[in-house]
Image: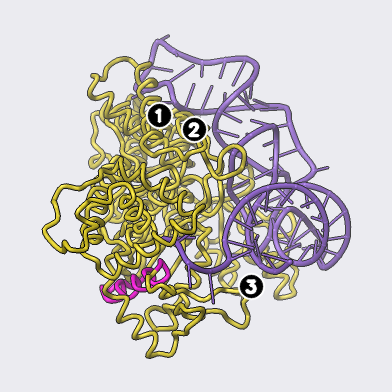
Chain colours: A yellow, B purple
Amino acid sequence: MLSLSERLSAAVGEAFEAQGLDASYGAVKVSDRPDLAPYQCNGALAAAKKAKQNPRQLAEAVKAKLDADEAFSEVTLAGPGFLNLTPSQGLLDGLLGELQQDEHQGAYRRETSEKVILDYGGPNVAKPLHVGHLRAAIIGQSLKQIFRRAGDEAVGDIHLGDWGLQMGQLIAEIKRRQPDLVYFDRAVTEGYPEESPVSVADLAEIYPVASAACKEDPGRMAEAQEATAELQAGRPGYRALWQHFVAVSQEALRADYGRLGVEFELWRGEASVHDLIEPMVDELAEQNLLEFSDGARVVRVAREDDKKDIPPLLIVKSNGSVGYGSTDLATLVERKRDGFERCVYVVDKRQSEHFVQVFRAAAAMGLYPEDRMEHAGFGTMNGKDGRPFKTREGGVLRLSDLLAMVDEKAEERLKEGDGSLTGEERAEVARQVGLAALKFADLSNPRTTDYVFDVDRFVAFEGKTGPYLLYAAVRIGSVLSRAGSSEEEALGFAAAPAEPAERELAMQLLSYKDAHRGAYEKRMPHLLCEHAFSLAQAFSRFYAACRIADEESAEVKNSRLALTALTSRQLRDILGQLGLEIPPKM
RNA sequence: GCACCCAUAGCUCAGCUGGAUAGAGCGCUGCCCUCCGAAGGCAGAGGUCAAAGGUUCGAAUCCUUUUGGGUGCGCCA
């Protein structure tokens, strides 16, 4: 179905066409001057400029046509050619009726469905999740839901960092610490123990040590690089040890992502494509795309019109090992093979140059056209000093610690309530409320901008927050049950908004598609957050201004129940896409 | 050095294919529960949109320069 602004745009567009001008000048948007009218169209000014006409006269002609259109109850002309538009009661009632019937609840739908894979994990084996992983996980999970709502077949891949230098660093470090382990005995090639010699906690401790050692000691780095190459070449002991790393890490990651409510349909990693690399290298060589450079093999991707130097994509390092350039390229080979039509990478925007390299190389070898591979980059989470976020001790804040903080805060807030929740219920609601605060605080920032990470904001429950949205949803449910009506029943009542607050709520409800479409097309969940907040706000005003359950007139009451039910259904639909769970009460 | 991004209210941020009086949340001030959930609603104070030029009937938005921040630039991912 059409959104209200689309419906109005169509009408105004026709009026422009009747003047021999492009219909796109008829674009209608929510007014900047709500005191004059709820919608506006400024196209007459731009059209007049282009057609060298008088804007005021042009707007007059458009207005004359719109005056005869029953979609508008009022059309006024202001200033040099601004059209102020008020949709008619009949139009609102009619569109609300359509919305009640719409099987997609007013959401945006693509004409054709695409098979899309989203990459929003990328955690490294051995490194526990920290706040830096939060954005990718939350934005990616949300984008996946937004894609699905629009009709795409979207799946998420965790794409573990399990095949690069860090693996060699771990192996080399463990070898130094426990050289007698069977994994390091070249004479042994099978029958390794099933029990992992290291736990996730061990790995978390070992990795930073190993990483730091390599940074300051070239000798240690050489050991790690050699171990990496040997691992990739298939040395049995290393492979067996590596298997343990992956297994213990996956278990921990499942738990962490699970707590966040983030899911992956695919648990692949860099290592999954190892066997695809050799044929890929052959293919690149065959296509004359591969060059030797300083002992390494690379694909040159620089172009004449580049404003800056784009370095070549490193495929095989001089020591024979492969890095993420080749695994990422091979991953595209794999995704193409598996029938994915579009690949979206929800990864820190600082890696944009890397994706330019990979995408160009992939396009050059004919895997995908460049517009089918996207880097939906996101901004850095900074501390209050403007630099990437660190805890006071200088480390990164672990995700589990952040979750615990938010949880505790929500629990405290719930204890202030009327005590109708049992301890167990309260713990569950606290989890939902805390998580909602956290996710909404992150998602409501535009994806691409950096933002200041402020714990207080993540645990705020008032104003433009996740809990505000949950509160609205919970209260709606409570109103419906108090009125003795169900959502399904109320959706069958005729909605005829009369009061200003009712009309404003109706107009919000009828703009869902615009917000969803924007979020989908731009890959920007914050647009959906904006809409959710506006909707909840419109409902809260409506609730404050109008009686619902105890309204005397049955007709008015039913109309209001219909608006309430529509809000309930739409809010639930949106919160689902944002990953917020609505508790029964709070 | 080269390239890219950012600078809007006390704070955190929207708005940027140019358009009427620049918005939100927090914080601050004052109201609103004998009535469906006050994690709420209403009202108010608060801004040379970093600075200077330019394009335009019209610039927070486009162009140039300057200042101040941030980021990236082949064997880490």
Label pair 1/2, CB-CB below 8 angstroms: yes
10 Å crowding of disc 2: few (<14), some (14-19), many (20+): few
- Check the image and report above or below for A565 versus A310: above
Image quadrant where one finds the N terminus of chain A: bottom left
Residue beneath disc 3: A308
Query: Residue A239 appears in which quarter of the rendering?
Result: bottom left
Going by the numbered disc 3, the residue's amino acid type is Lys
Q: Which mark is residue A455?
A: 2
Between disc 2 and disc 3, whose residue precedes? Answer: 3
Measure the C-alpha gap from mark 1 to mark 2: 9 Å
Q: Which residues are magenta?
A: A323-342
In the image, A541 versus A545, the foreground residue is A541
Please indicate, yes or no, whether residue A524 appears anywhere in the rendered image: yes
Secondary structure at badge 3 equals loop
- Check the image and report above or below for A376 versus A555: below
Q: Position of residue A143 (x, y in %)?
A: 38, 55
Q: Which mark is residue A507?
A: none
Residue under mark 2: which chain is it in? Answer: A
Going by the numbered disc 2, the residue's amino acid type is Val
Question: Residue A271 in magenta?
Answer: no
Q: Position of residue A490 (x, y in %)?
A: 27, 39
